[in-house]
Image (spheres, rainbow, N blue to C red):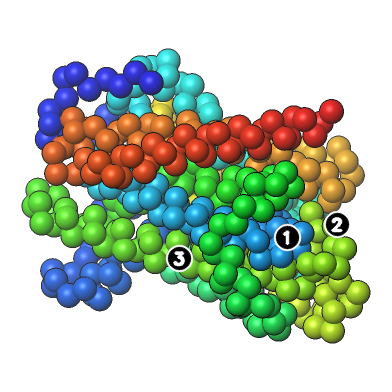
Amino acid sequence: MEIMTDNVSTKPRDLMGSANGPSLEEINGTVTIPKEKGFWKNLMAFSGPGALVAVGYMDPGNWVTSIGGGAKYGYLLMSVILISSLIAMLLQYMAAKLGIVTQMDLAQATRAHTTKRIGAVLWVVTELAIMATDIAEVIGGAIALQLLFGVPLIIGVSLTVFDVLLLLLLTKLGFRKIEAIVICLIAVILVVFAYEVIIAQPDMGAAVANFVPRTEIMHSGQLTMALGIVGATVMPHNLYLHSSISQTRKFNREDPSEMARAVKFTTWDSNIQLFGAFVINCLLLLLGAAMFFGKGADQLGTFGNLYAALQDNKLAGAVASPLLSTLFAVALLASGQNSTITGTLTGQITMEGFINLKVPLWVRRLLTRLIAVAPVIIVTIWFGGDETALDNLLVNSQVFLSIALPFSMIPLTVFTSSKKIMGERWVNKPWVTIAAWTCTVVLTILNCQIVWESIRGLF
């Protein structure tokens, strides 16, 4: 990648801002923080953006892989969830730091420090990745509405367009309202799966022991499932999102101590929320292992099948009940709604950052939603509302995310490792740079493996 930093000062202040204005201008710098230095007051003030980011690590795209991994291989893949979460914490720390220090989101920084040709390619890939991410959320929400209320899939998919109206209303009320709703929906997901796991009574000793990676993971079937969990967990759109919403806090950016405070507590917020996502993903795998492992549950690859299995005595045992399946659908609906909010915000970030698209706010957000909904509606109509077709579309969208991930990770690692962009104080420490490049290379190789397995599966 060609980075244009020859005429850039070593002071990050000279880079701040963008030709097309602040990132998410309507909410940028709108949340006040206390002047006191108390840890808990500052943590509460900076808490929120991490929750919106964590949503992407527990979205409907993760559910089938985590529950399916537990159903097929028991507790073996617990270590994969742990490693994925640690990688996520590293990447999101760098993304948030980029936004706070340069006052540019990742899209704006890419536009500023690459050639127009490379920037155009990265923009197209990023837009497709956001579409792929949104497809999973739209499908999850539509299927949840069908399971809970019998709403036909085509109508459920169409209703997701109106999420934009909710987001516009919440933006008018203040960004803290968006953060609060997202946190509440995350709490719903956490409570539902904690309850279901308690009922399922997993072997916690075996689960904890498998946080240590085992050689069995390298076997063909186990490795494929492990790669699926990694690919569904670390998503490119979150890097753009976090680099933008980390700028919503209002503080004196000329004061180095204030900048340090913002980076510190934004990192705390991110790590705490990502730990919550880690817990939820562990609960998903625990649920699959405790209820379905060793029972021949090979057909758990769709949301509908999972819903039915939770009330099937032959699969779920004595704890199976309509209540468990209903709670599963409620959590799926909450996850879908959460993810559509963050996906729409990310769509706006990339449109403004990469191509400086100047249209009314409601048009930008409606356009972002329609781009994601269109392929889902087409598939739904073409296959007559068949859930299997939508599930196949969801799986294919996750495969594309695997392809798109390096196109976000590489620019982020390059920018945050550059003294000319970040300044002497904020550039990545050597160990962070080494870890970031290691993760980038390893994830790229693993994601290529996912793509190869998918292509080979077609033949």
Q: Quadrant of the N terminus?
A: top left
- Residue assigned mark 1: 73
Residue at left offset 16%, top offset 53%? 259
Callout 1: helix, strand or loop?
helix
Residue located farthest toward the front when viewing the structure as drawn: 215
Q: Residues within 10 Å of mark 2 (few under 14, many from 20)?
A: few
Where residue 83 sits: x, y (%)? 50, 54
User: Judging from the image, what secondary structure is the residue with disc 3 in?
Assistant: helix
In this view, the residue in front, 416 or 73, is 73
Q: CA distance from mark 2 to mark 3?
A: 30 Å
Query: Left of 20 or right of it: where is 33?
Result: left
Task: Give me the residue at 45% from left, 21% from top.
Answer: 120
Tell me the residue that label 3 is attached to. Answer: 275
Q: Nearer the viewer, mark 1 or mark 3?
A: 1
Residue 145 showing in the rendered view: no
Comes first in the chain, label 2 or label 3: 3
The residue singled out by tag 2 in the image is 299
Amino acid type, callout 2: Gln
Q: Amino acid at mark 3?
A: Phe
